[in-house]
Each structure stands twice: as C-alpha cells, then as structure tokens.
Image (cartoon, grey):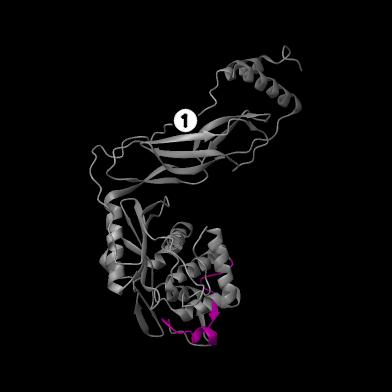
C-alpha cells in the first residue's frame, strides 16, 4: 500500500497525530492544598528503646525511625510470620480453621509461654491460632509449624522464603517461635512490613489480633499488648520478650482513615514498650494523614501503540495508590506520568509501561509502576506497514 493509496481514515489519523505531544505530565484532581494554613511540626519523639519505626499501613511510607534496619532478636514477634503463613494457607484453601491438629511431644514440651495444650490431643486450628496470637503459646506455634511443613526446621525454611518474597533485607528465621537461636534475627523495619502484609493481605483474619483474652484448658490468659486496654484505636498486633531481646511490641491503630504501624524493640519492661509505642502512634496521628490518590484500575492516560490491533492502550495502576503527607503542610500534591515514548505491539495486560511519580512541593515522595490495563495484540500486515509510515512522517516533524 502506497502513502497516496492510504484510506481517508488513515489520513485523518495522520493529521491528528502530527500535533500529538509525546511527553505527558498529569495534574490529577487530588492536586490541592493539603491544609489551608501551615504550622510547625516538632521533631519526632525519642524513645527509650534500641530501635523503632512508624509506618503508614496503606502507603508503606516510613514516618519515624531510629536504627530501623538494625538486626536484633525478635523474640515472639517472630510468630507474626508463623501466623501470616498459616493465614495464607487458610485463605488459599490448603488449610481449614476446623482442621484438627495433633499435638506432638515436641510441641507439648516446648518451653516459654504456653497455651497449655495436651500431648497427643487434637486441637482445631482456629484455637491454635488464638493460642499463637493472643497467648503467644510456643506449644501451639510448634504444633502448627509441624502440621504445615512437617518439622520446625522445614517451617523455618518456608518462613525465610516468605521473607524473601516480602523483600525483607534484615531478617532470618531459625524457628517459628522466636526462642533464642544463633542466626535468628529481624529488624523493626522488616517487622513493620510483615505487620502490613497481615493487615492488608488477609483483613478477614485481622480481628484475631485485637482479642484481649483466650481460655484453653480452663486457663484464661490475657493478651500482653497493654495498648488494647489503653487506646481504643489500637487493634493489634503482637508482643515479644526474651532476656536477649528485651520487651518488644508491634502495634497498629486506625483513626479517621489513617492506619499506622509502630514497632518498638528492646525496651526495659512490659509497661515501657506500651508507653513508647503510644508516643509513636500519637505523634503519627497528630502530624500525618493518609491520602488515597488512585484506585486499582483507574485509567490515568492512553498511550499511542505502534503496529497494534488498537491504536491506544489504557495506562493506570494495578493497585490502590496511597500516600502519606504532613497534616500541617500547605504544599500541593502533583503527579507526573513518565510513560515510555515508543510503544509497539504486542503489549500484555499488566506490562509496566512507565512510572507514576508523586510530588509534594519540589520533593518526590513516592513512585509507583504504571501498567497496561488491557492487552494490545499485534495488528495485521497492512496496519503495521501503515503505522511505520505514520511513525516516519512524525519523525520528520520531530
């Protein structure tokens, strides 16, 4: 097909394309003042602990931290990963909460905090999960680990695989309980990431972490997270304590649409870990807020595709996008869509085609992948040849 023989519709398309801008900068509807009046923000609190971190559960942004990537013994905070793996297995149908799990002698004799299950008995998985999360029972934890993977060591291997998939850079597990073991460590930052996965990946299971008491074998034990009694906005997650680790706490609270995760490691007492965690949470809620920018599947732009069965591909995000901003700031939020300038078919759904950059004032505060929201198949021979002609002509104008 010669250029002169091209259909009229193609000529109209060519004329329209000549004026097409190839650089895209978006200013979305949420680009507005965060607050009408600016005010001062104090320095974050200094805590009496070895390390700590405050994270926004929706955006994943770190708001406050001190030695957050230092490798420390996590004690029973380890059980968050044990619980997460179990929740994953339940959610994917490989386990049921009604499954009866046999208590081995190895599980029964495990020291430390206990649920007080009886050796040789069969206990529903739902009850063992309460024993793990509420009572921090090492016996319940070992029983579940053996049921899932066959042994504690095999389950630890599984835990490390999950840690790698979550991108944890300062975590290695040797057992499912957190009992002291050489080479068993994590960091405040990594533990916050695990907590964020628990909250966001399996919200139907999350209510377990707010239970204040659990009774088994006629023994009623309280959840050791004192913030569940002191702060109505707190609804999780897990405590930990050994002589080596000190008193540790991963807590989460939700207020007015913002959910925060606080991790405090290495305090001196049960009360101290609660007090220091409360300081972090109060500071975060006072001076930060969560904004939802886009929903999963939102079309943010349409980009030209060369040689495709369709001329354009819708581009957007494949997950809800949140950001965390200072509640006191008067800087505007803006977004830049950095899209690849030369897209050729075929393009698969979900293929990354650029990045969304969130800017506040003159500072870039977040980047998210931009993906194709639908597939674009390769066009026929004539369509491909015509697109080559159009592309060549446009190149002359460049």
In the picture, which quadrant includes the C terminus?
Answer: top right
Q: Position of residue 319 (x, y in %)?
A: 50, 46
Disc 1 residue crowd, few under 14, some 14–19, many 20+, Cα 10 Å: some
Range of magenta residues: 94-115
Q: Left of 118 or right of it: where is 17? A: right
Q: Which residue is mark 1?
A: 25
The one of 226 and 95 positioned closer to us in this rendering: 226
Q: Position of residue 295 (x, y in %)?
A: 46, 43
The one of 187 and 282 positioned closer to us in this rendering: 187
The image shows residue 143, relative to residue 358, as above or below, that is below
Residue at 60% x, 77% y is: 150
Let me know if residue 363 appears in the view.
yes
Residue at 54% x, 79% y is: 101
Let me know if residue 262 appears in the view.
no
Q: Position of residue 143 (x, y in %)?
A: 52, 79
Picture quarter containing residue 302? top right
The image shows residue 333, relative to residue 194, as above or below, that is above
Residue at 52% x, 44% y is: 318
In the rendered picture of this protein, how many numbered marks are placed on residues? 1
Q: Left of 304 or right of it: where is 57? A: left
Residue at 60% x, 16% y is: 397
Is 359 part of what is drawn in magenta?
no
Picture quarter containing residue 114? bottom left
The image shows residue 155, relative to residue 162, as above or below, that is below
Q: Left of 334 or right of it: where is 385? A: right
Picture quarter containing residue 7? top right
- Element under label 1? loop
Q: Position of residue 306 (x, y in %)?
A: 65, 28
In the picture, which quadrant includes the N terminus?
Answer: top right
**Extreme residue in the top direction:** 4
The one of 327 and 127 positioned closer to us in this rendering: 327
């Amino acid at each position: 097909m010669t250029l002169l023989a091209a259909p009229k519709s193609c000529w109209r398309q060519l004329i329209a394309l000549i004026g097409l801008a190839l650089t895209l900068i978006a200013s979305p509807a949420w680009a507005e003042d965060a607050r009408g009046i600016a005010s001062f923000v104090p320095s974050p609190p200094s805590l009496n602990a070895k390390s700590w971190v405050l994270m926004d559960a929706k955006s994943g942004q770190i708001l406050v931290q001190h030695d957050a990537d230092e490798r420390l013994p996590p004690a029973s905070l380890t059980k968050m990963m044990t619980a997460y793996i179990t929740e994953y297995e339940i959610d994917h149908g490989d386990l049921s909460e009604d499954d009866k799990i046999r208590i081995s002698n190895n599980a029964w004799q495990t020291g430390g905090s206990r649920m007080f299950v009886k050796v040789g008995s069969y206990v529903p998985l739902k009850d063992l999960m309460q024993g793990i999360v509420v009572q921090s029972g090492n016996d319940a934890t070992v029983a579940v680990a053996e049921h899932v993977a066959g042994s504690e060591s095999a389950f630890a291997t599984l835990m490390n695989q999950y840690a790698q998939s979550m991108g944890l850079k300062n975590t290695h597990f040797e057992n499912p309980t957190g009992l002291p073991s050489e080479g068993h460590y994590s960091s405040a930052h990594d533990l916050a990431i695990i907590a964020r996965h628990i909250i966001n990946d399996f919200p139907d299971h999350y209510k377990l972490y707010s239970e204040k008491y659990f009774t088994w074998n006629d023994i009623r034990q309280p959840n050791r997270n004192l913030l569940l009694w002191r702060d109505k906005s707190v609804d999780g997650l897990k405590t930990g304590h050994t002589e080596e680790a000190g008193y540790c706490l991963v807590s989460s609270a939700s207020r007015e649409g913002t959910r925060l995760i606080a991790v405090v490691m290495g305090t001196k007492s049960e009360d101290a870990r609660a007090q220091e965690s409360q300081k972090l949470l109060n500071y975060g809620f006072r001076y930060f807020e969560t904004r939802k920018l886009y929903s999963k599947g939102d079309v943010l732009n349409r980009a030209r595709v060369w040689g495709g069965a369709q001329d354009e591909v819708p581009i957007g995000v494949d997950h809800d996008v949140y950001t965390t901003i200072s509640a006191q700031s008067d800087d505007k939020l803006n977004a830049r869509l950095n899209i690849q300038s030369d897209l050729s078919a075929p393009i698969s759904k979900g293929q990354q085609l650029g990045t969304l950059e969130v800017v506040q004032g003159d500072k870039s505060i977040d980047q998210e992948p931009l993906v194709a929201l639908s597939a674009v198949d390769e066009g026929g021979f004539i369509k491909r040849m015509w697109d080559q002609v159009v592309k060549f002509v446009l190149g002359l104008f460049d």
